[in-house]
Image (cartoon, rainbow, N blue to C red):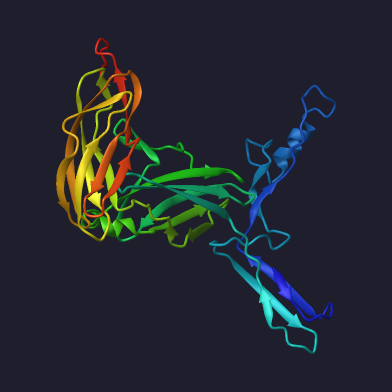
Amino acid sequence: MEVNPPKQEHLLALKVMRLTKPTLFTNIPVTCEEKDLPGDLFNQLMRDDPSTVNGAEVLMLGEMLTLPQNFGNIFLGETFSSYISVHNDSNQVVKDILVKVLKPLDVKTKFYNAETDEVFLEAQIQNMTTSPMFMEKVSLEPSIMYNVTELNSVSQAGESVSTFGSRAYLQPMDTRQYLYCLKPKKEFAEKAGIIKGVTVIGKLDIVWKTNLGERGRLQTSQLQRMAPGYGDVRLSLEAIPDTVNLEEPFHITCKITNCSERTMDLVLEMCNTNSIHWCGISGRQLGKLHPSSSLCLALTLLSSVQGLQSISGLRLTDTFLKRTYEYDDIAQVCVISSAIKVES
């Protein structure tokens, strides 16, 4: 609690009493073995102590509650009750009485933009208090353009199990990472120009409980990401095999999207690299592509080198502006010898 009084000292009397904020009573157990000089005296004293737990007298925590000797801390998002009495003994007006609120959680976010218009959000949540927290709920409320999928659980025996285990406690100063995947809704995904400029993703809703079940809740402001820069023409992969045979043709499917505000007349060129060789005619006409429109291409290629190979060498030329767009390191594929059998 912070108070801004006049410059004179000892002119403002302030009394604060916090309500319904007890803590568990703790004691220091003192015991010894029966062969020692006190014998069973210490153990008997602990059994007779009303603050100890029957049958577990050596535990520090008892069954009683104790009222605090001071006001304690107020955390943002927590509900508390208090009685505040302020008496001004000066002849001046006291304008401001400030209540200092501490931050219970530190939330950091990172965004990862995928090639398929998906957005991955990583939220790092750290407990800034001095006591454990039970994380009751950490959810992401997406914006109107996205659907969200939580990636914080795995399926085991047909049931969803949290990746954090059965206990959702967050110890003081510990950090936990939550992951979410946002996919654009169908009506927005079909319009490339709309999704391209979307920066507002949604907001996090966090609910927790402290020692005696007191609930706290925080909602972040709208989370914003930097809009991905696709340029005028965006090329993405719709289908590609994970593993292919050495010197054997394989197929991929590419999607070309016009992200500009003008119509393009595109020509596709395929340039071979040291390991990747394109099959087909280079320099073929793809025709006109209107703004926010897309077309899919099925392409064939082969690799002459084993190992993890990068697919590169695609070139798109807009004949209207005589501008060429180069696409290298589009994806990677594992190339194995045809004599090696891979079990799926």
Say above or below: 276 vs 212: above
Q: Quadrant of residue 314?
A: top left
State left or right for residue 54 relative to residue 27. Answer: left
> Is residue 218 placed above or below 337 in the rendered structure?
below
Residue 6 position within the rendered picture, expressed as x and y whole percent measured from the top left:
78, 81
- Left or right, 21 with respect to 92, comes to left
Q: Is residue 108 left or right of residue 140?
A: right
**Picture residue at 25% right of the left edge, 44% below the top:** 316
* Residue 23 appears left or right of 222: right
Q: Quadrant of the N terminus?
A: bottom right
Residue 278, given in percent of the width and then of the height, sits at 23, 29
Q: How many marks?
A: 0
Judge by depth and name the residue closer to the eye, 137 or 259.
Answer: 259
User: At 58% across and 49% down in the image, what residue appears?
Assistant: 127
Most foreground residue, 275 or 137: 275
Residue 3's x, y, as percent? 72, 74
Q: Residue furthest bottom?
A: 91
* Image quadrant assignment for residue 16: bottom right
Q: Nearer the viewer, residue 240 or 311?
A: 311
Instruction: Check the image and report above or below for 303 versus 240.
Output: above
Q: Residue furthest top?
A: 339
